[in-house]
Image (cartoon, helix red, strand yellow):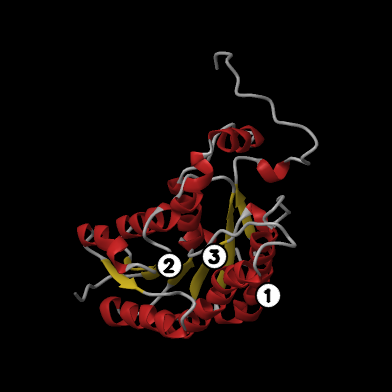
Amino acid sequence: MTTQVERAAIVTGSASGIGRATVELLEAQGYGVVAVDLDRDQLDWCAELDRVAAVGGDVTSPELNELAVRTAKDLFGGLDVAVLNAGVAASGDLFEAPLEVFDRSIDVNVRAVVLGIRAAVPAMRERGGGRVIVTASTSGLAGDPGRWAYNAAKAAVVNLVRAAALDLAADAVTVNAVCPGPTETGMTERLMAERELYEDLRRAVPMQRWGQPEEIAAVIGFLASPAATFITGTAIPVDGGITANTGQFRPRPQSTRPL
């Protein structure tokens, strides 16, 4: 497959959730998209889309990141946007959780972003600029009980985005992060299965519901669009208002009053 497109993108963590929603959005907007995920078999749905190529592999591998960029260049003529969305959850007691949990969180949630940027930016420079968009989390903006490994990794990636934005601004490459709150994705299936926890998180959201992957993808699409040419170094919460709250008081329950 070689397809003539005006813009091309890579999206990691594309098998489901935010990644899949982003692939579908960008493809619908005319992008050629390289969809990347650990398990190539989980990307079979990509065959239904005309301008999407699937690549399987581990984002912690430099070779995988280079393959994704090479695929974008070979099939779509270059690379304009890199959505570094792949991530892993991590939780456990600060003293009892194996350090391997922490190491894996840093490896996937932070180091893989560095590898993605290193692989993507040279191709973007060839096009005169580009966009790097990273999926961080509201958990990178504050702490959560029992999720220190995830908090540390997502906080690191938020500041990585800021630093990379400074380093790459002169190349006309913008670097931004989106910070989802509770969102119904494959990574949060375990939380959704625990009804009490699901409801507790829902009540913490001022909008009184979990987010949908398409809502996060819409902000990613904006950051990739011509409307966002002067935005860089930001971490945008897409969280239904969670980060607006001091945490001292619960938001008002959903109104039963007529609009």
Q: Which residue is mark 3?
A: 134
Cα distance between the residues tagged 3 and 1? 13 Å
Q: Is residue 217 above or below residue 229?
A: above
Q: Residue at x 43, y 75 (%)?
A: 58
Mark 3 or mark 1: which comes first in sequence? Answer: 3
Measured as percent of width and height from the top left, residue 115 is found at 52, 80
Packing grade of label 3 (10 A; few <14, some 14-19, many >=20) is many
Among the 4 quarters of the image, the one containing residue 66: bottom left
- Residue 10, picture quadrant: bottom left
**Crowdedness of circle 2 by 10 Å Cα count: few (<14), some, many (20+)?**
many
Which residue occupies the extreme right position in the image? 248
Q: Is residue 34 left or right of residue 239?
A: left
Is disc 1 placed on a helix, strand or loop? Answer: helix
Question: Residue 163 — which label?
Answer: 1
Relative to residue 26, is residue 258 depicted above or below? above
- The quarter of the image holding the C terminus is top right
Dot 2 corresponds to which residue? 12
Mark 3, secondary structure of its residue: strand
Kind of residue at badge 1 = Ala
The quarter of the rendered structure image containing the N terminus is bottom left
Q: Earlier in the sequence, mark 2 or mark 3?
A: 2
Instruction: Estimate the x, y position of residue 21 in percent, counting from the top left.
Output: 39, 53
- Measured as percent of width and height from the top left, residue 169 is found at 61, 77
Residue type highlighted by circle 2: Thr
- Could you tell me if the residues under marks 1 and 2 are in contact, i.e. CB atoms within 8 Å? no
Q: Residue at x 54, y 73 (%)?
A: 113
Q: Is residue 173 visible from the viewing direction of this image?
A: no
